[in-house]
Amino acid sequence: MAFTSFHFFVFFPLVIILFYLCPSRFRWMLLLAASMIFYLVFSWQCLLLLLGLSLLNYVIGMRIVAPDGHIRKGIYISGIVLNILFLAFFKYFRFIGPDLRKIADALHLYYPQQILEIIFPLGISFFIFTAVSYLIDIKKKVLVPEKNAGILATYFLFFPKLIQGPIERAGRVIPQFMQNYRFDYDDATAGLKLMAWGFFKKLVIADRLAVVVNGVYSHPGDYNGLTLITATVFFAFQIYADFSGYTDIAVGASRMMGIRIMQNFRAPYLADSVKDFWNRWHISLSQWLRDYLFLPVSYAVSRRLKNDRYLGLKTEHWIYLTAAIITFLICGIWHGVGWNFAAWGGLFALYLSFAQLTIKRRRKINRWAGLTTRPRLLKTLQILITFVLITFAWIFFRAENLAGAFTVIANSFKGWSHTGISDSVKVLSDMGLNSHELILALLGILVLLTADRLSETKEIFLRIMNQPVLLRWAIYYAIILAIIFYGVFEKRPFIYQQF
């Protein structure tokens, strides 16, 4: 069930009540049952599949470690490969399925269309990433295999994080399912506030911006100039408000049960470099890619390069470039099938590679321009440049295909005459948002950025708690009333559900 559905607003309070009525040693059973019910609303076939994958990873995890403590590498490698094959099949089958059907028809082979085409488990990517990290951590001996299959299934299927993450590590979450946690008023209210903030981001900001973004990007060839740039900037904030809103709801819901899961975003559009952006955006995925892909690739390459330089570049640069390119190309392909996603990942690899190769030169330019003596101006420029680079990359992420992305880029340079700008303003007003709603969308972005800026030094709700009681409650009621009166309740799915 979706967090924004009526079912969830009935389901979650019942879970909370039962959670505190249930003895602590049985709470993992309640959470497993609740998670199964949560997912059952989407598909019972997919639920059975995820339960089967949970059992498979339980068996593999238990078999990786031999009785004498040695790691059975064959079982470990087989487990990793099986998980990746499951991910590849379910993620890409819907794209290659029609071609497979044609081949089957040509060869007069049976093609189980009805079975295969109805199965696409929501959250399969996050599930598989979680399972892979579980097996790798066992292999590294930083984690002991979980002996209780039910508790491991609870970890895999825990409903707040199941569909969109964050991608939590087993060693951090599993022990929390067995803790003797008692109701804590501060945790409960903090969780509710965080959930309300998440709903505000999703319903008031993201889903309102989606009206313009979807309208423009569905037919990018019909628009140019200001319209396309506005839609692209709106998408940057739409995907941020949408995805971080989901995380806030997930973190808040978990906190109300005394379970701490990681915050997945930290003011990403205040990053002063692309590298800094990935330290702030989808943090659990960034850390997963770093620990299980970037660093292993770096170590593998470093073992094979014996000289100090190759083709004029230091070996350390070659190691970084190779690891960055492989990591972000895989990151792009993971997000979706299509050359536009590969280009999106490749673009970030290019950004990071360029930054790595020009560190010293950029420092010299900053000193020459006198920016090193004006750190605030330098940081502001770095934030603006980073935002432009990130927003440009979002074009490839949001476009329906590579051709659509290039159409957006090409047409963005057109229609900048006085007449063209006037036409763009009129087009935006006809996209489904009247002037009042457009102002509301811009205010929502301003509120989001202000909250991010304030949270750079101290969590936003801790700041609010230190305010006078009247101001504090005025802010809380303003968020609630904004959701009720200005929320877009059109059952738009969260963007990252499809990944």
Image (tube, rainbow, N blue to C red):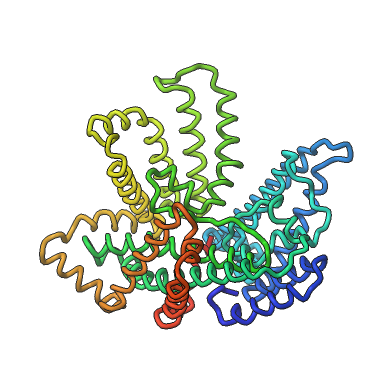
324 shown above or below 119: above
Answer yes or no: is residue 1 visible: yes
Residue 177 x/y as whole percent: 74, 61
Q: How many numbered badges does the structure rendering display?
A: 0
489 shown above or below 366: below
Foreground pick, 287 / 427: 287
**Looking at the image, which residue sits at the far top?**
307
Q: Quadrant of residue 168?
A: bottom right
**Looking at the image, which residue sits at the far front?**
468
387 shown above or below 36: above
Foreground pick, 344 / 315: 315
User: In this rendering, would 284 be left or right of 446?
Assistant: right
**Looking at the image, which residue sits at the far right?**
67
Residue 60 x/y as whole percent: 78, 49
Q: Quadrant of residue 220?
A: bottom left
Answer yes or no: is residue 119 visible: no
Residue 140 x/y as whole percent: 72, 38
User: In this rendering, would 174 be left or right of 222?
Assistant: right
Foreground pick, 491 / 79: 491
User: In this rendering, would 254 be left or right of 233?
Assistant: right
Residue 378 x/y as whole percent: 30, 41
Foreground pick, 107 / 316: 316
28 shown above or below 148: below
Q: Quadrant of residue 30?
A: bottom right
Quadrant housing the N terminus: bottom right
Could you tell me which residue is drawn at 89 percent across and 40 percent down? 67
Could you tell me which residue is drawn at 44 percent across and 47 percent down? 345
